[in-house]
Amino acid sequence: MSDALTSAQTRKLKAIAQRLDASIKIGKNGLTDGFLKEVDDALKRDELVKVRFVEFKEEKKELAPKIAEQTQSHLVTRVGHVAVYYREKPDPAKRNIKE
């Protein structure tokens, strides 16, 4: 993603993410096209998505930024076996998360 999140934006997104459940899980198949499409669809719908590393726990430090890159989203935070991604909707009227 081109524009980095400000520290205020990151704090706000982390606070919102605390109340979310991890809706997507990385299983034994890893970063498949189907998995990336699922993340992409969730970002289109919700803007903020939590991903749980069920498998590949040892590789999460390397995989988390790759998921952000491949879904053109921001990696907001990675805590334990969970990563949080954010991608703003292009249309301001349709955004779920307001400034």
Image (spheres, rainbow, N blue to C red):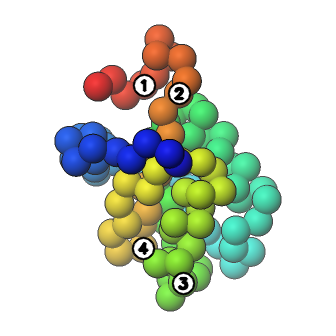
| Marks 4,2: beta carbons within 8 A | no
Q: Which residue is mark 1?
A: 96
Point 51% across, 68% down: residue: 64
Left of 99 or right of it: where is 68? right
Q: Is residue 25 above or below residue 97?
A: below
Dividing the picture into quadrants, the one containing residue 54 is bottom right
Q: Earlier in the sequence, mark 4 or mark 2?
A: 4
Residue 45 percent coordinates (x, y): 58, 32
Q: CA distance from mark 4 to mark 2?
A: 26 Å
Select label 2 or label 1 by which is in front. 2
Residue 32 percent coordinates (x, y): 76, 65
| Marks 2,1: beta carbons within 8 A | yes
Q: CA distance from mark 3 to mark 2?
A: 29 Å
Q: Which residue is mark 4?
A: 81
- Kindly identify the amino acid type of the residue bearing the numbered disc 1: Asn
* Most foreground residue, 38 or 90: 90
Badge 4 crowding class, 10 Å Cα cut-off, few under 14, some 14 to 19, many 20 or more, is: some
**Residue 19 in view, yes or no:** no
Where disc 2 sits, the SS reads: loop
Badge 2 crowding class, 10 Å Cα cut-off, few under 14, some 14 to 19, many 20 or more, is: some
Q: Earlier in the sequence, mark 1 or mark 4?
A: 4
Q: Earlier in the sequence, mark 2 or mark 1?
A: 2
- Kindly identify the amino acid type of the residue bearing the numbered disc 2: Lys
Q: CA distance from mark 3 to mark 1?
A: 31 Å
Check residue 89 in the rendering and tell me which mark sits there, or answer none: 2
Where disc 3 sits, the SS reads: helix
Q: Which residue is mark 3?
A: 59
Select label 3 or label 4 by which is in front. 3
Residue 1 percent coordinates (x, y): 52, 48
Point 66% across, 40% down: residue: 41
